[in-house]
Image (tube, coloured by chain):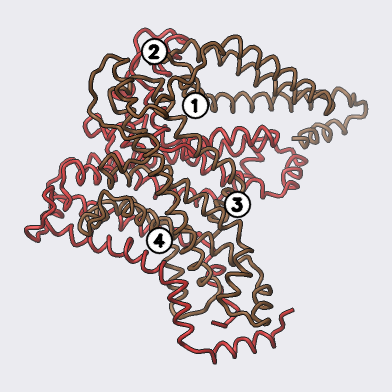
Amino acid sequence: MTTIADELTIERRGHAGSAARRRTNFVIFLGPAIVLTILFFVVPVIIDIAVSFTDLSRSLRISEFTTEQYEKVLRTDRRLSQVIGLTFIYVFGTLAIFNVTFGLILAITTTAIRNVSGSFFRGVWLLPRMSPSVLYILLWLWAVSPTEAGLVNQVLMQAFGLDAPLDLLTSAPVALIIISNGFIGASMGMIIFTAAIRGIPEHLFHAAAVDGAGTFAKIRFITLPALRWPISFVTIYQTLSLLVSFEYILLLTKGGPFYDTTVYALYVYRRAFESGQYGYGAALALFLIVIGVVVALIGWRFFDMERLLQRPRIEVH
Amino acid sequence: MAAQAIPELSTAASEPPVDWDAVAARARGVRRAKAVVLYAFLIAVSLPIILPYFWLVTIAFSARTGVAETAVLWRSMAVVVPAVVAFWLTAALAQSRRQLWIGLTAVAAIAIFAFAVLVGPDLHLGNFIFLWEPDFASVVRSRIGEVKGAVQFPNVWHAFGNSILIAGTQTAIVVTVASLAAYYLSRFQFPGRSSMLRSLLVLHAFPVLTLIVPMFLMLYWIGLLDTLSGVILVLVAFELPFAIFIMKGFFDAVPWDIEMSALTDGASRRQAFVSVVLPQVRNGILAIAVFTFIRGWEEYIFVFTFLIRNSNWTMSLYMYWVRDDVMGVDYGVVSAVGVFYLVPSLILYMAAQRYLMQMSIGGVKG
């Protein structure tokens, strides 16, 4: 068993140990991680800032340094306001309908039924998250296919007597990107909320029942207050990931028809890789990077910093 | 839900002549009605998810002419849906374990028989032609009356190998580097430790997709664009903060005493790490290994942007181009490719489900 005396001797020995060994340990253990992080996080950010002040385009050659990209962002690009508006609708629509609300509903309903059935339904809702993105979107493309063979059209035409097949990809593209992302997003809230609900002491529900609380009163006065922290966590985390991710939209609608489903992150991608305006893409991306870091910093408050920063207790190298 | 009966009892208790059985029966009725509503709701919202996956599998094994044969889909649904309902009812109504087993076996036997009769004759493996026919593209294209497509397809096993190579290498590097770094961060005091942990937290939540433009340019300038090693390095770096974060949690949970006694017995810190501490965090290593592997297997955006030549294609690109090609109208082949691509992912998730849950929750709590 360790006693304080032991710790002290070990600590003293550690201080006497050679600084050289300390340095080699640092290099062996932390070296690779630091090098990779600097190479692929710090350097790209610097490149991004540098490139945003150039006219780098399809030829991938820099001919002059300018601030024209920022003028374009702030003044001349008329499409940008539409893109930003759409991004707001997309992020908050998905978040409010699916990631938080529907995730919550799923967590509450699946914990209210028998455990086996509950995990079965949760498993079903995890399927989209477990499928590779290309495949998941393939299923969507088939489901909403404008022909009579599309799954949605089959159901609508055979069960509800619709006459002509619908073309949802052109008539309701924004709703489609919200739903297809929401099906995936709901499962994260579901898992986190389920864990939180499981952690609520059972006797609180019994006590409420004795006091005459019905199902909804119990949810309102016990479950929801207990979920305050998880809900804020999911909101912050998912806002960030919805803001920067565009994978499913790119696969489903390619940002179209025209620019109707091009959210900000996808706009950066299309400007850089479709139009070849790398300089402009870099300038646009910089705003997103700044927002990302700010949201990540806000997210800090939700981590248990004290525990993470706890000092190590052995000082031997 | 048993608690539901309690308010009924307390109100009833104030009036002396109480028909307890009726009260209990009513409480049971309410409880059952609530359960029915819950199940109906969950089934209704889960069907839109199950149906497309079910469709995918059915088409992959049954489509013959390339057209999605919906008759087979609805016929197999007609078998599977009653079977699932019957399973549930049996599980809910069975009084004893023996009854349960007899009931389940009977339902399964009937379902298998019905499936064999109604759907069996339509099943075949012809759509998996891409697995053994390297030039399957022209076969499929001629079947649907197209002579030429725009895309030249590599052998599927080549794409499969690329995916395994990317995911495997990435996993090996991430596990090694993350374990080393997480151990050091967890157990050593050094100047700058707390600021390093703080930046780790930011990196953990950092939106890496925003770096795709500068990353593309960087790879182009150092000549790693359109190479597998370039993609692997990028993916490794992006997975690292998360993996370190998770591993640090696992190292933090290892008792100090174990390490302390190893040191007292004369081991160095490096020896203690390798032979005493590492075996304690096996679950953590397994978790981040599976997670990183799945991420590599599924990766689409970065490989789509950074890899161009078709000899560098991964399974995700293969899948994408099969659908995008003229033969994309052949639902049978596309879904067969889809099943081939989906199954490894699902198996890995199922196998590691426990660890992944542990990890996602650990990640939330910090």
Sequence-wise, the earlier of marks 2 and 3 is 2
Asked which secondary structure carries label 4, the reply is helix
Q: Mark 4 highlights which residue?
A: B203
Circle 1 crowding by C-alpha within 10 Å: few under 14, some 14–19, many from 20: some
The residue wearing badge 1 is: B53
User: Disc 3 marks which amino acid?
Assistant: Gln
Q: Pointer 2: what residue?
A: B65
Subunit ID for the residue under disc 1? B
Which chain's residue wears label 4?
B
Q: Mark 2 to mark 3: distance in Å?
A: 46 Å
Which residue is at 44% across, 34% downward? B341
Q: Is residue B302 above or below residue B86?
A: below
The alpha-carbon separation of the residues under discs 1 and 3 comes to 27 Å
Left or right placement of residue B45 versus residue B94 in this view: left
Mark nearer the viewer, 1 or 3? 1
Label 2, secondary structure: give it. loop
Q: Position of residue A20 (x, y in %)?
A: 45, 86
- Callouts 1 and 3 on one subunit: yes
Q: Amino acid at mark 2?
A: Thr
